[in-house]
Amino acid sequence: MYRFLLTRQWVILTLVALLLIPTMIRLGFWQLHRHDHRQALNEVINDSLAAQPVPAESLTSVGGTVGHDDLYRRVTAKGRFDTAHELVVRRRTSTDDQVGYHVLTPFVLDNGRTLLVNRGWIPSPGSQTAFPKIPAPAEGGETTVTGRLMQDETTAASGIKNVKGLPDRQIMLINSKQVGTLLRGTGDGSAKEMLGGYIELTSPAPKGGSPELIPSPKEDSSWIGLGDVNLPYAVQWWLFAAAVPLGWLILIRREARERAKATEETREEPAPAAVA
């Protein structure tokens, strides 16, 4: 009755089903791991934003790295902005999804060390090769800044390709080691002692609202909480995996019934009349 399972068509169909089941199960666990990672990161963010600000140099060092548990931690630093050596980061979006630049300004501390400060978003000028006009910091001279501490960006973590050959003072990734090398190459002596990571400026607020400050993750509902769709995707893949053998069995039974019916109809056909 089920000898048709040995036909080429059914052997191929069975092999495809056997391949799909473990693949879908693995995809479900992959989505579950992404969900767990996202939940853990959200917990770190909530704890960091709730903590009191601390000096930036208590959480990072020259040539060092920012720890995972210190992500988005509010930090302070006292010094002055070095706008003569500021850079722009290409292909960054505003809160309403307009493409422009992030303004990255070296902040020279009182001890001579440098902390990179992402001052926020500005729109792109008409020319992609011209350096955009950047509003001055809210306070000139010595000032105290507060911001959220971030890890250096990499292509592997961000998915952003580090394009070479860009116009002067334009970069793709905010990476303290790469920026330090770039600034030292232009003769910026203050970049000799570059602190690892960077901060997203929260205060002082810019004059006239430009550059546009980067919103807190709590203010960006598409990134934290409401935008977490990985768990539903995991369940979806597991349901698909369960549906494959069920569908396979339904197809087999339907095929068996149709073949049995065809055999029965063949037997019931009257024999042709004999010719006299």
Image (cartoon, rainbow, N blue to C red):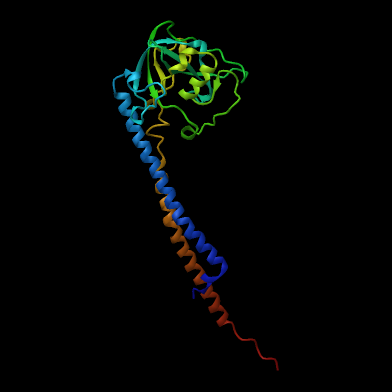
**Residue 174 appears in view:** no
- Residue depicted at x 56% and y 66%: 9
Residue extending furthest toward the right = 276
Q: Up-down: is 157 above or below 149?
A: below
Residue 33 position, x and y percent, is 38, 43
**Residue 28 appears in view:** yes
* Snapshot quadrant of residue 100: top right
Tell me: 15 left or right of 223.
right
Q: Up-down: is 267 above or below 9?
A: below
- Residue depicted at x 29% and y 20%: 52
Residue extending furthest toward the top = 141
Residue 246 position, x and y percent, is 43, 61
Q: Total of numbered circles in the picture?
A: 0
Residue 228 position, x and y percent, is 40, 37
Tell me: 159 left or right of 203.
right
Residue 108 position, x and y percent, is 42, 12
- Residue depicted at x 48% and y 13%: 189
* Snapshot quadrant of residue 163: top right
Q: Nearer the viewer, residue 93 or 147?
A: 147
Tell me: 33 left or right of 187.
left
Q: Up-down: is 204 above or below 240?
A: above
Which quadrant would the C terminus be assigned to in this image? bottom right
Q: Nearer the viewer, residue 245 or 76?
A: 76
- Residue depicted at x 51% and y 70%: 5
